[in-house]
Structure formats: C-alpha cells, structure tokens
C-alpha cells in the first residue's frame, strides 16, 4: 500500500483514508547472503534491483468493486510463489497502517510491504510449485 498523506498515530477507522492505493511488490531474497553470511535477513533483501514494484498502482476506488483489498478474487490478484490471497492475511490493511503509525510517521509515498504469507520459498523443494 502507498501512503497519500502524512500518518502518525492513526486509528484503524482512519487508516484507509491515508492509503493512495496498492501495488505489487516482488519480495526477493538472496538466501546465501542470509544463511551463509551471518544470518541477517536485511543482507538478503537489500541487493541492487531487489524489491521491484508495479507495474501499476491500483487506487482504492479501482478496488472498490471488491469491497476490501482483502476480498480481491484469486483471478484478479494472484501471488504465484505462495499461492496465497489477500483474504488470507493475518492482519488487515487498517490494522497494519494503524500499528506502524504508532511508532513511526508515514509520509506520502511511503510503502508498507505486508510480508510473506504461508508458502515462503525457503521451505519449498526446488522445481516444485504449490
């Protein structure tokens, strides 16, 4: 999700008013940097060209037909590597934005990446899809 206005100590009820839209984020990991070079997750997620976004921003009004970003149909928004859906998120967008805004100020354009659902690539066998 991408912020459209400054957010600090935002309630869950106010949270979606701070969301400009939603964008796909490909969460790459270089496992050898993480596992063989000291175990720091940030090492494996911070290489040049990692964390690409796009190819477009879906605004809240464009997603309105789904009633909620958590209700997007599988045919509309699929995460192939994990075969998970937004409806399977443990915490919804309003909670996540509210929570993060309690300890940092979010500025317009800031992104909150919601993390990896079940099926993270590290636990998969090579050559097998879910």
Image (tube, helix red, strand yellow):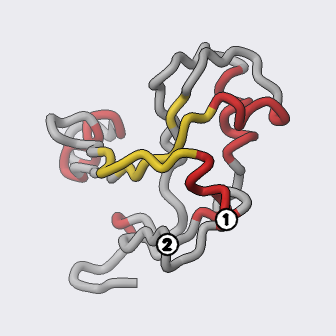
Q: CA distance from mark 1 to mark 2?
A: 10 Å
Give the residue displayed 22% in from the left and 49% down from the top. Answer: 30
Give the residue displayed 49% in from the left and 72% down from the top. Answer: 76
Give the residue displayed 20% in from the left and 39% down from the top. Answer: 37
Q: Which residue is mark 1?
A: 66
Query: Are discs 1 and 2 less than 8 Å apart at CB?
Result: yes
Please rate how many residues cluster around mark 1, counting C-alpha atoms within 10 Å: few if below 14, some from 14 to 19, many from 20: some
Query: Mark 1 or 2 closer to N-term?
Result: 1
Up-down: is 128 above or below 74?
Answer: below
Quadrant position of the C terminus in the picture: bottom left
Up-down: is 23 above or below 77?
Answer: above
Please rate how many residues cluster around mark 2, counting C-alpha atoms within 10 Å: few if below 14, some from 14 to 19, many from 20: few
Q: Position of residue 61 (x, y in %)?
A: 61, 49
Q: Quadrant of residue 80?
A: bottom left
Give the residue displayed 47% in from the left and 25% down from the top. Answer: 110
Secondary structure beneath label 1: helix
Q: Nearer the viewer, residue 78 or 46?
A: 78
What label sits on residue 76 in the rendered view? 2
Q: Position of residue 45 (x, y in %)?
A: 29, 40
Up-down: is 63 above or below 34?
Answer: below
């Amino acid at each position: 999700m991408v912020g459209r206005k400054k957010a600090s100590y935002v309630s869950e009820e106010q949270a979606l008013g701070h969301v400009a839209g939603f964008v796909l984020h490909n969460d790459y990991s270089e496992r050898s940097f993480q596992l063989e070079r000291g175990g720091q997750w940030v090492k494996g997620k911070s290489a040049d060209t990692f964390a690409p976004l796009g190819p477009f921003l879906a605004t809240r009004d464009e997603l309105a037909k789904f009633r909620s970003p958590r209700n997007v149909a599988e045919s509309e928004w699929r995460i192939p590597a994990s075969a998970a859906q937004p409806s399977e998120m443990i915490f919804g967008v309003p909670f996540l934005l509210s929570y993060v805004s309690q300890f940092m100020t979010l500025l317009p354009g800031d992104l909150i990446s919601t993390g990896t659902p079940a099926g993270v690539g590290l636990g998969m066998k090579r050559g097998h899809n879910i």
